[in-house]
Amino acid sequence: MQMSEEELDYVLQALSHRVRRRILRMLIEEKPSYTVILKKLELTTGTLNYHLEKMRRLYRVESSRYVPTELGLKAYQMVYGGRPRAAAGRDALLSLIRIDQLARQASLGSYLHMAASAAVGSAAALLAWASGCKPASLALNCVLPLLFTLAAAKGLYRLKAGRLVPVYPAVLQPLAAQAAYPIIRRHVLSASTRPELAALALEYIWPKLVFIWFFALLLVAVKESLQVDYSRAFVSAAVSVVASRLVLQLLDQATLLLG
């Protein structure tokens, strides 16, 4: 992984102290909590806070654990001559499967993960189209949530929202699931001993599950790509979903009136 001149300057300054180099190793190898770092390095809270502030671009806090950013991984590779097995193997594979990891890595500029995000989104869109979703409806369902999310994030919080674009395609999986609903329904009913009850359950539960799935993925993509907390990500995603639904309903009514 290559570093820019600005990143190199920052890393050299951040790792000029041996305590911060030890912290970096812990980030990579252990993903420790604040308390674990404090105890293992036998530091005071003030001293640890000082060192963490000096290397704040090399880590992020995730579920109370300190984990490396992409720049942190680059710094480790530069200092220790390679990435650890966990980071290069299992975690790299998981980052292509898990939406939170995919969004985080793509938002950091990883071309591999941006390509994976685009591939996931393209496959979902193709499946939706093959299942009978109209191209115009498919395009609107794909584009509107993204546009409204960008507008909400920028308007409400003055965020630079461009980084959401490379990771957004990965959240289109529920769209494919919704478009494939007739096929799924047919198979479930044919396999069920009580098709009437199964049909009722599907009609009631399926739309809610798909909506929760879509909203959860959009929330994660907003949080990781725009680097905001969950409250701001939730508001931006909620505004996007509400606005998209309203516009789509208005378009449906206009189509009916014109038709």
Image: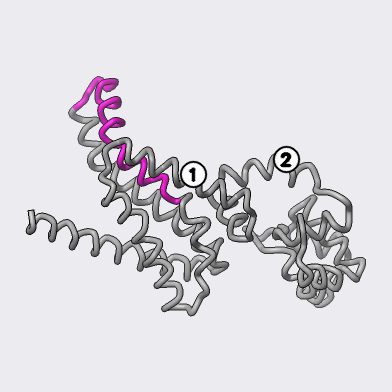
Query: Dot 2 corresponds to which residue?
Result: 89
Residue at image position (38%, 65%) is 147
Magenta span includes 92: no
Residue 142 horizontal/vertical position (percent): 36, 54
For marks 2 and 1 on the same chain, the one whose residue lies earlier in the sequence: 2
**What amino acid is found at the position of numbered circle 1 in the picture?**
Val
Find residue 239 and report its image quarter: bottom left
Find residue 20 and report its image quarter: bottom right
Under circle 2, the secondary element is loop
Task: Rate crowding at label 2 as few (under 14), some (14 to 19) or many (20 or more) other CA atoms within 10 Å.
Answer: few
Question: Relative to 241, is 1 on the left or the right?
Answer: right
Under circle 1, the secondary element is helix
Mark 2 and mark 1: Cα distance apart in space: 21 Å
Residue 219 horizontal/vertical position (percent): 46, 59
Say if 192 sits above or below 171 in the image. above
Residue 37 horizontal/vertical position (percent): 80, 62
Query: Dot 1 corresponds to which residue?
Result: 120
Say if 247 sits above or below 157 in the image. above
Magenta span includes 192: yes
Q: Residue furthest right?
A: 18
Task: Rate crowding at label 1 as few (under 14), some (14 to 19) or many (20 or more) other CA atoms within 10 Å.
Answer: many
Residue interval drawn in magenta: 171-195
Structure colour scheme: one colour
Say if 91 sits above or below 58 in the image. above
Taking depth in this image into account, of 130 and 90 the one nearest to the observer is 130
Which of discs 2 and 1 lies nearer the camera? The answer is 1
Report the quarter where the N terminus lies. bottom right
Residue at image position (59%, 55%) is 106
Say if 83 sits above or below 253 in the image. above
